[in-house]
Amino acid sequence: MTFPVRCRCGTLEGTLANPQRAARAACYCRDCQAYARFLGKPELTLDAKGGTDIVATRPDFLTFTRGADQLRCVSLSDKGLLRWYADCCNTPIGNTPRDAKFPYVGLVHDCLAGSDSERDAAFGPARTALNTGSASGEVKAPRLPLVLGILRIMRNVFSAKLSGAYRRNPFFDVQAGTPVATPRILTEDERKTFGANVAKS
Ligand SMILES: [Zn+2]
Ligand SMILES: [Zn+2]
């Protein structure tokens, strides 16, 4: 089973394998909010309380079938996550660590091409909430789904490492250890404009 992946304009397309292996969470951190503002359409990405619906999975489960040359990445600081987007229409794609050998991607819902109910059916509803301190309202963050989500992510990371599958990663040349697009690091002023954490993260 696969789930379709697509930027808003359709130039970038792909598939996500094994959707049932993903861990889903809403992240309310200021940096996810800043990433959405940087891309210009935060109202499409953020929920009413500033949360981003994220599907965490293994990069090798993701295949871009066309438009991969549109991938760009931005980072809110020189040590922050790489935050990927499609240059054609500024659709957020997902977050990866900077370490090419760490097999993790948190896909942003905007690029998961399905209705809310199709996403719920494929990934399960988002029961986990992260960084709720910076939500613009009260958000429940139950612990059990959080722990289960962390275990799922750990299982994905270890299985990709053990099998060698981590070497296939559409965001990196894993051999060389370099991202497929040069990260654009936001300036101090840009960080302020987009409301990122002032302390670097
Ligand atoms: Zn596009
Ligand atoms: Zn976040």
Image (tube, grey):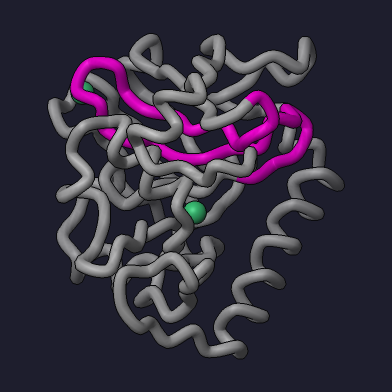
Instruction: Please name the residue shown 62% across and 43% down the image.
Output: 199
Residue 87 horizontal side relative to residue 149, left or right: left
Instruction: Please name the residue shown 34% across and 33% down the image.
Output: 193
Assess whether residue 80 is covered by the magenta stretch.
yes
Q: Residue furthest right?
A: 162
The N terminus appears in which quarter of the rendering? bottom left
Magenta span: 78-104
Residue 5 vertical placement versus 127 (above, below): above
Assess whether residue 201 is covered by the magenta stretch.
no
Could you tell me residue 25's position as x and y percent?
46, 67
How many numbered discs, if any? Answer: 0
Instruction: Please name the residue shown 31% across and 77% down the image.
Output: 137
- 199 or 68: nearer the viewer: 199
Residue 110 horizontal side relative to residue 115, left or right: right
Instruction: Please name the residue shown 37% across and 49% down the image.
Output: 33
- 182 or 101: nearer the viewer: 182
- 92 or 123: nearer the viewer: 92
Could you tell me residue 91's position as x and y percent?
26, 32
The C terminus appears in which quarter of the rendering? top right
The quadrant in which residue 178 appears is top right
Could you tell me residue 80's position as x and y percent?
63, 35
The quadrant in which residue 7 appears is top left
